[in-house]
Image (cartoon, rainbow, N blue to C red):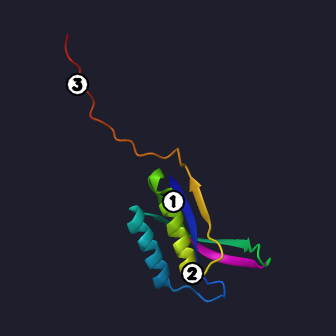
């Protein structure tokens, strides 16, 4: 499967998240899931359903490809990031749950002569 999350560059109160903290979060994802792709900065907006406040965010878009069995682990990892950064919600997109696979290719069998 492939999952994507957005790591906010600012806390909800407007303070910047340090580059060191963002780098550590990305490094932890890479270690936990054997790699990730940092797809750069993306801009977005989110309307908090609790108080109708509009947040305009810049975030780092991070994508991870891992085994389907790691879906719950991926959800927990993203929730932990959200807790660390004091977020109300975290973007979490799962793609190719049944589509991306790593197939082992066996050696071709030798043909027997008749």
Marks 2 and 3, the one that precedes in the sequence: 2
User: From this viewpoint, which residue is outermost toward the top?
Assistant: 114
Please, is residue 44 above or below residue 1 in the view?
below
* Foreground disc of the pair 2, 3: 2
Residue drawn at (48%, 62%) of the image: 73
**Magenta stretch, residue numbers:** 53-60
Callout 3 environment at 10 Å: few (<14), some (14 to 19), or many (20+)?
A: few
Q: Is residue 107 left or right of residue 67?
A: left
Residue drawn at (51%, 67%) of the image: 76
* 75 vs 109, nearest the viewer: 75
Q: Can residue 39 be seen in this view?
A: no
* Foreground disc of the pair 2, 1: 1
Mark seen at residue 19: none
Report how far apart the C-alphas of labels 2 and 3 lie in the structure. Answer: 57 Å
Residue drawn at (66%, 72%) of the image: 43
* Foreground disc of the pair 3, 1: 1
Mark seen at residue 110: 3
Q: Is the magenta stretch mostly helix, strand or loop?
A: strand
* 103 vs 71, nearest the viewer: 71
- The image shows residue 31 at horizontal and vertical percentages of 38, 68
Q: Mark 1 points at which residue?
A: 72
Asked whether 58 falls inside the magenta stretch, the response is yes
Callout 2 environment at 10 Å: few (<14), some (14 to 19), or many (20+)?
A: some
User: From this viewpoint, which residue is outermost toward the left?
Assistant: 113
* 51 vs 26, nearest the viewer: 51
């Amino acid at each position: 499967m492939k999952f994507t999350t957005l790591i906010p560059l600012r806390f909800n109160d407007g303070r910047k998240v340090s580059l060191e903290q963002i780098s550590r979060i990305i490094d932890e994802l890479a270690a936990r899931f054997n790699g990730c792709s940092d797809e750069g900065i993306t801009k977005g907006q989110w309307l908090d359903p609790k108080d109708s406040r509009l947040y305009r965010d810049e975030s780092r878009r991070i994508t991870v490809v891992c085994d389907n069995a790691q879906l719950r682990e991926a959800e927990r990892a993203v929730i932990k990031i959200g807790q660390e950064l004091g977020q109300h919600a975290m973007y979490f997109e799962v793609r190719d749950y049944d589509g991306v696979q790593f197939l082992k290719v066996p050696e071709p069998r030798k043909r027997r002569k008749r």
